[in-house]
Image (cartoon, helix red, strand yellow):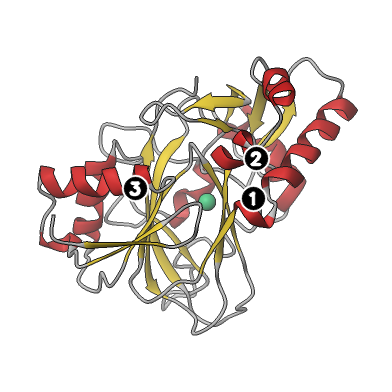
């Protein structure tokens, strides 16, 4: 394929230039990009996608996997339904901007904590694809933590201890704990549609790599432990997983399209730009059941 790939750090991430996603998504291009993505720890930025339309974004997303909100697929959680693009149910908007009537154009301050997208569903997100349509001149970086590297660098004794464990991921608990006043607690949350139990260590269905699959944003506790024991173990694993050696910090350029793998990465959006306008559009692929 006729594009250029450069590493972004010594441990993860690739920068791709020379691709126009809007020119169409042939099987070869989709397959080549997927390969680059998987070989680089599940992170790639495709630069300079100025021409990318909502339709082009959705076509690329659909080539990466089934999308939340697509006609025959489940939507994202109800609490973000007001931020879904009115004409494109596959697109979730992240923004601090308002429209002419004063309504938010997207979810403000989304993801300002370590998390893996939609981990509270039985089938959590695989790829998330974020198109930076408008960004502040400085600030608004996003951090990514490599949960495969974090797992690999644990001792064999700790790996063996963690492999049989299961964690509960619960959006309601996270909503109450972290942003009670920002989130409407809907019936959907109470019926358990946004609660799932997953293995603490998951094996990537495409690469075979093992990763830690817990996150402070949505993981409420470990199954079978006392609450104190669960917090003690989780907090220490989070401290380990967010060591600087495992982090890549993305400084956005205009019309970056970033694709990250929620199966093997956590991310954290830094909200340090106040009211300086920022507008991004995300599509999110539905992954398999973690094993
Ligand atoms: Fe996120």
Instruction: Tell me how far mark 3 sits from mark 2, CA to CA.
Output: 22 Å
Q: Which residue sits at x=44%, y=62%?
A: 8
User: Which comes before the other along the chain, label 3 or label 1?
Assistant: 3
Q: Which residue sits at x=50%, y=19%?
A: 291
| Image spot of residue 253 (x, y percent) | 40, 75
Left or right of 50 on screen, residue 171: right
Against 282, is 99 above or below?
below
**Camera-nearest residue between 225 and 275:** 225
**Camera-nearest residue between 137 and 43:** 43
| Image spot of residue 263 (x, y percent) | 48, 36
Q: Which residue is mark 1?
A: 114
| Image spot of residue 150 (x, y percent) | 63, 40
Q: Which residue sits at x=49%, y=81%?
A: 136
- Look at the numbered discs 3 and 1 and tell me whether their residues touch, using CB distance below 8 Å: no
Q: Which residue is mark 3?
A: 37
- Look at the numbered discs 3 and 2 and tell me whether their residues touch, using CB distance below 8 Å: no
Against 245, is 127 above or below?
above
Q: Residues within 10 Å of mark 3 (few under 14, many from 20)?
A: many
User: Which comes before the other along the chain, label 3 or label 2?
Assistant: 3
| Image spot of residue 242 (x, y percent) | 68, 50
**Camera-nearest residue between 250 and 227:** 250
Instruction: Tell me how far mark 3 sits from mark 1, CA to CA.
Output: 21 Å
- Look at the numbered discs 2 and 1 and tell me whether their residues touch, using CB distance below 8 Å: yes
């Amino acid at each position: 394929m006729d594009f250029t790939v450069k590493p972004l750090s010594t441990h993860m991430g690739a920068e791709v230039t020379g691709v126009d996603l809007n020119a169409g998504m042939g099987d070869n291009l989709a397959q080549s990009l997927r390969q680059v993505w998987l070989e680089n720890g599940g992170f790639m930025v495709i630069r300079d996608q100025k021409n990318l339309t909502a339709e082009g974004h959705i076509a690329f997303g659909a080539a990466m996997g089934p999308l939340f909100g697509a006609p025959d697929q489940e939507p994202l959680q109800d609490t973000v339904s007001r931020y879904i693009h009115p004409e494109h149910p596959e697109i979730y908007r992240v923004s601090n901007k308002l429209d002419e009537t004063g309504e938010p154009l997207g979810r403000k301050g989304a993801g300002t904590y370590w998390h893996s997208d939609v981990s509270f569903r039985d089938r959590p997100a695989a790829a998330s694809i974020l198109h930076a349509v408008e960004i502040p001149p400085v600030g608004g970086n996003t951090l990514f933590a490599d949960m495969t590297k974090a797992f690999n660098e644990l001792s064999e004794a700790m790996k063996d201890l963690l492999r049989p464990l299961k964690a509960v991921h619960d959006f309601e608990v996270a909503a109450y704990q972290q942003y009670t006043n920002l989130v409407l607690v809907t019936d959907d949350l109470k019926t358990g549609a946004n609660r799932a139990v997953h293995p603490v260590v998951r094996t990537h269905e495409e690469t075979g790599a093992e990763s830690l699959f817990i996150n402070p944003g949505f993981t409420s506790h470990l199954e079978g432990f006392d609450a104190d024991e669960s917090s003690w173990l989780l907090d220490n694993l989070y401290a380990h997983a967010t060591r600087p050696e495992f982090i890549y910090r993305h400084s956005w350029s205009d019309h970056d399209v970033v694709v990250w793998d929620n199966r093997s990465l956590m991310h954290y959006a830094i909200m340090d730009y106040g009211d300086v306008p920022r507008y991004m559009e995300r599509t999110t692929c539905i992954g398999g059941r973690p094993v």
